[in-house]
């Protein structure tokens, strides 16, 4: 069972920052998940929330500020004084420190209302890094459709946050061709995983932060988990 460091080693350092990614690598992570959205001037930055209020010393939407404004923010003090002054990184800055053979799970954060060109921006950056092991996931399935249309060789992961009554029918009707389904862990069932595997799709589940929960989800036969703890001991899938 694979383990992706969720937003880096986010249990040990402020999520989606270079210290969190460095810590994940230090702890031996072979997969790292991160979130990407666009600034007002179209720079892909690594940040989870659409609003800055909880995790920086600013407020409002990320997409309303320029990269120059975003780069001046403190994205570490909320976690601890040790990380005061830690910046929000760009996607390209993260690529500079993560080895190419560590799989990056890049989650696109996009508000459909604004029709931002984030899929193209991310695809362009990743296409220039041909040796990189990566996949692109999103709760915004339209963004995944755009990624697929831009490059159908990119592995995509369909994120979901609820129990879908018939996930296979949904995926097939959407036209998406996923590498993986990425459901929230509490909605996993043996049948869900078996159905996905019959279609040739992997199942990667979030967020699993205890050995006990890892043991439970492993019983379904899933392929991987996302965890805030890259050093979490995980059992083999059944």
Image (spheres, rainbow, N blue to C red):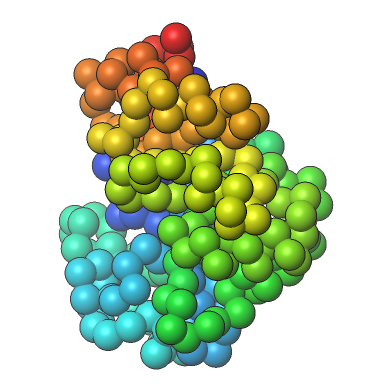
- The residue sitting at 46% across, 72% down in the picture is 110
| Above or below 149: residue 232 | above
Q: Is residue 200 left or right of residue 192?
A: right
Residue 123 at x, y percent in the picture: 69, 65
> Front-most of 75 and 188?
188
**Residue 24, located in which quarter of the rendered image?**
top left
Quadrant of the snapshot with the C terminus: top left
> Front-most of 167 and 144?
167
Q: Is residue 2 visible?
A: no
Residue 36 at x, y percent in the picture: 49, 65
Q: Is residue 222 left or right of residue 198?
A: left
Q: Is residue 41 left or right of residue 74?
A: right
| Above or below 159: residue 198 | above
- The residue sitting at 34% across, 26% down in the picture is 189
Residue 165 at x, y percent in the picture: 36, 43
- The residue sitting at 43% across, 41% down in the picture is 166
| Above or below 17: residue 115 | below
- The residue sitting at 70% across, 59% down in the picture is 148
Residue 78 at x, y percent in the picture: 19, 63
């Amino acid at each position: 069972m694979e383990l992706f460091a969720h937003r880096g080693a986010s249990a040990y350092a402020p999520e989606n920052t270079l210290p969190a990614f460095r810590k994940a690598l230090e702890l031996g992570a072979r997969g790292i998940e991160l979130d990407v959205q666009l600034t007002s001037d179209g720079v892909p930055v690594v940040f989870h929330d659409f609003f800055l209020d909880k995790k920086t010393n600013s407020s409002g939407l990320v997409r309303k500020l320029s990269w120059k404004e975003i780069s001046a923010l403190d994205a570490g003090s909320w976690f601890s004084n040790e990380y005061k002054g830690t910046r929000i990184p760009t996607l390209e800055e993260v690529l500079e420190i993560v080895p190419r053979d560590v799989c990056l799970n890049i989650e696109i954060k996009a508000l459909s209302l604004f029709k931002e060109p984030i899929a193209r921006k991310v695809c362009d950056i990743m296409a220039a890094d041909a040796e990189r092991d990566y996949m692109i996931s999103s709760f915004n399935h339209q963004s995944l459709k755009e990624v697929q249309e831009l490059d159908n060789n990119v592995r995509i992961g369909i994120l979901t946050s609820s129990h879908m009554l018939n996930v296979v029918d949904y995926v097939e009707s959407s036209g998406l061709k996923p590498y993986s389904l990425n459901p929230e862990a509490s909605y996993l069932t043996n049948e869900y995983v078996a159905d996905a595997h019959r279609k040739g799709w992997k199942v990667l589940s979030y967020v699993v932060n205890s050995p006990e929960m890892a043991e439970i989800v492993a019983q379904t036969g899933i392929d991987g988990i996302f965890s805030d703890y890259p050093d979490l001991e995980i059992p083999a899938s059944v």
